[in-house]
Amino acid sequence: MIRLSKSVIGEKESEAVTRILLEDGYLGMGSEVGKFEADIASYLGVSSDTVVCVNTGTSALHLAVEAIVAIGEEVLVPSFTFLSSYQAISAAGAVPISCDVYEDTLSIDLEDAASRITDKTKAIMPVHYASNPVNVDKLYEFAKKYNLRVIEDAAHAFGCTYKSKKIGSFGDVVCFSFDGIKNITSGEGGAIVTNDFEVLSIVKDARLLAIEKDSDKRYSGQRSWDFDVKRQGYRYHMSNIFAAIGRVQLSRLDNEFAPKRIELLKLYQKLLGSNLKVLFQKYEIEAYIIPHIVSIRILDNQRDGLKEELEKQKIPTGIHYKPNHLLTYYKTHYNLPVTEKVYSEILTLPLHPEVKISDVEFICKIINNYLN
C-alpha cells in the first residue's frame, strides 16, 4: 500500500540508537544533543551557539513566541497552517491574529496582515507552507515597516534555500520541526535558530524547566543541583536518542532524501500540469525547494469525489490544512475568503523518499481519468 507520508529509517539510524543505549547509557539530554546542534549549525553555516534543539517543532515555536511576545500581545499568522502554529502562540499567552493567504503561493497575505495590525501587534509568524519560502525579502521589509519581530514557522522547510541562503542561516528567529515525516526526522524534535542571544538564553533555559545554565552541564554529562529559576520553564529538551537519529538523517538529506523528493514533485507537475482542473501552488523562483508535502487544488467542486476515488484505489490523501479561524477555540468574527476557498479545494498526495516513480504514474493516471 502506498503511504501518504512515512519515516525513512534504516540501519545507520538503528546503529546510532544502539550506540546511545549500550555505549553512552544516558538517554536524556546530553552530549549527543550538543553534537546534533553543532551538526545543524554546520549545515546551515551558522555559529554552533545559535541553534537550540527541543523535543518538537511546536515546542520550538512556543518558546520562540514566549521569548519575544508578552502575555496579551498579538502575533499575525496565516490561518492556513497546522494547528501547532496557533497552539504555540496561545500557549505563550499571546493572541494569534488570523490572516488570509495569497491564492497563488498560499503564503501570508501581507496586505491583509497590515489591515489587522493594532497597538498590541508584536510579531508576525510566516509559514513556509509546503517548503515554499515566498517573498522573504518583502516579509522582512513588512516587519521593519511595522516594527515587528519575525518568527518563521519553517517546519516544512529544513534544507531549503532562498536566494542561495539556507532557511535558518539568516533572518530573525527560525523554527524547524524534525518529527517523523519531515524532510529529516529525529523521531520527534525541533530546533530554534537565531542570532538574538537574549532569545537563545531564554529558550536554552526554558527547555530545561528554566534551570539557569543547565544546558552546558547536560552536554558534559552533569546535572545542576544548586540552581536558580526566575521564569516558567518546561520539559521541552531533546533526548540523546532522538539526537542520534537526527544526526544520521541530516547526513542523508542532500544526497538521498532531497533528490528523491524533488524528483517526485517534478513528476507530479509534469503528469498533472496540463490538467485544467488541477492547480499547483506557485513556488518561489529564487528558492531551492525540498518538498515536505505536495498539495494540489482540485477545481469545479470535484475534490471530495476525487479523494474518495483515490481511497477506493488504496491511495491515501490528505487535506493540509483546516483553517484555524474556523476552529471553535480560534474562531474569528471575520471571514478569510481565499483561505476558505483553498481549503475546499486542497488535496495532498503521497510524497516521501520511498514513493516509487510507478506509484506517482499510477496516482496521476487515476486523477487525470477521473477529472477528464
Image (spheres, helix red, strand yellow):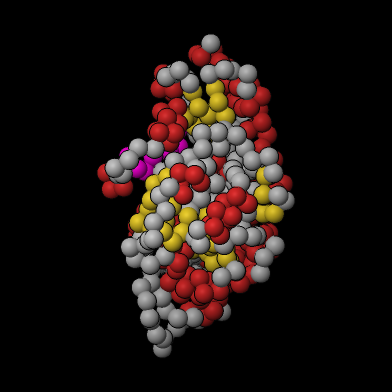
In this image, 211 relative to 164: left or right? left
Which x, y percent locates residue 234? Answer: 38, 68
Q: Is residue 277 magenta?
A: no
Say which of 161 and 18 sits in front. 161
The residue drawn where x is 40% and y is 49% is 116
In this image, 327 relative to 278: left or right? left
Q: Main secondary structure of the magenta part?
A: loop
Which x, y percent locates residue 257? Answer: 65, 44
The residue drawn where x is 62% and y is 22% is 273
- Find the magenta span and give its range: 318-326
- The number of callouts visible is 0
Q: Is residue 320 magenta?
A: yes
Is residue 292 positioned above or below 72 on the image?
A: above
Which x, y percent locates residue 219? Answer: 55, 76
Say which of 182 and 223 sits in front. 182
Is residue 72 positioned above or below 264 on the image?
A: below
Dividing the picture into quadrants, the one containing residue 368 is top right
The residue drawn where x is 48% and y is 40% is 101
